[in-house]
Image (cartoon, rainbow, N blue to C red):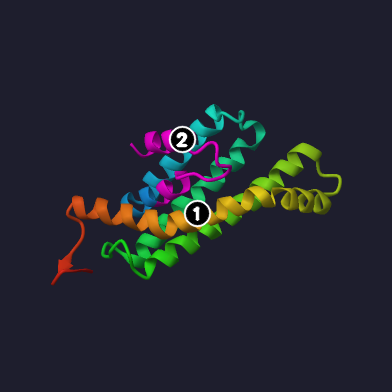
Amino acid sequence: MFVAVILASNYALAPFANVKLEDTLVFVSAYLYGFPVGASVALLAELGWSTLNPLGFGGAITPFLLACEVLYAVAGSFAARVWGRGGSPLSERNLFFGSLMALCAFAFDFVTNAATGLLTVGTSDVAATVLRFELQGIPFMVPHELSDMVFGSFVAPAVIYFVMRNKGLLTVDAGVAN
């Protein structure tokens, strides 16, 4: 289900460069169901998107995209260990989730930009190539990191809360979610 929603939302958001719900839903799947599920969702969704992307096939960069998407599964399972099963859709964890996802987006963008440069230009001058591709990637990195911060702060906690509530996994005491 997560993979289908991710691919459908990726197509719906394709006109907006690097703004996707994919990262958020990978994070959520790992938070709710653990790292193995989150990593599976990350790999299947990214492989599907890298292959069927309307902007073109991922090609040689695909292994880097796959590895970096798994970062969100790592972050989601880490967040679940830190915050546990309690919570509400609006709490201090919103900023934690958003910040964690923005850090993942930064790492994702840094690695994939560097890999793109090294695969495209080669390794004759690694530092100059990486710097050039990082600088050229800034217009794509900013919306990715900002959207992950926003989606991580608001969408992820809301989805986690409502799934947990509907599955009876939340404990509620005196009207306040624990």
Res. 148 mark: 1
Helix, strand or loop at label 2? It is helix
**Which amino acid is tagged 2?**
Ala
Side of 8 relative to 139 (left or right): left
Residue at 70%, 41% (x, y): give it. Answer: 116
Residue that protrudes farthest toward the right in the picture: 124
Q: Is residue 8 magenta?
A: yes
Residue at 17%, 54% (x, y): give it. Answer: 168
**Which amino acid is tagged 1?**
Asp
Side of 121 relative to 4 (left or right): right
The one of 73 and 138 positioned closer to us in this rendering: 138
Side of 142 relative to 124 (left or right): left
Q: Position of residue 44 (x, y in %)?
A: 45, 35
24 is higher (above) or lower (below) than 170 = above
10 is higher (above) or lower (below) than 81 = above
Residue that protrudes farthest toward the front in the picture: 15
Q: Quadrant of the N terminus?
A: top left
Which is the main secondary structure of the residues drawn in magenta?
helix
Q: In this view of the protein, can residue 44 be seen by the observer? A: no
161 is higher (above) or lower (below) than 113 = below
Residue at 44%, 54% (x, y): give it. Answer: 151
The 10 Å Cα crowd at callout 2, few under 14, some 14 to 19, many 20 or more, is few
Q: What span is colored magenta in the figure? A: 1-27
Res. 12 mark: 2
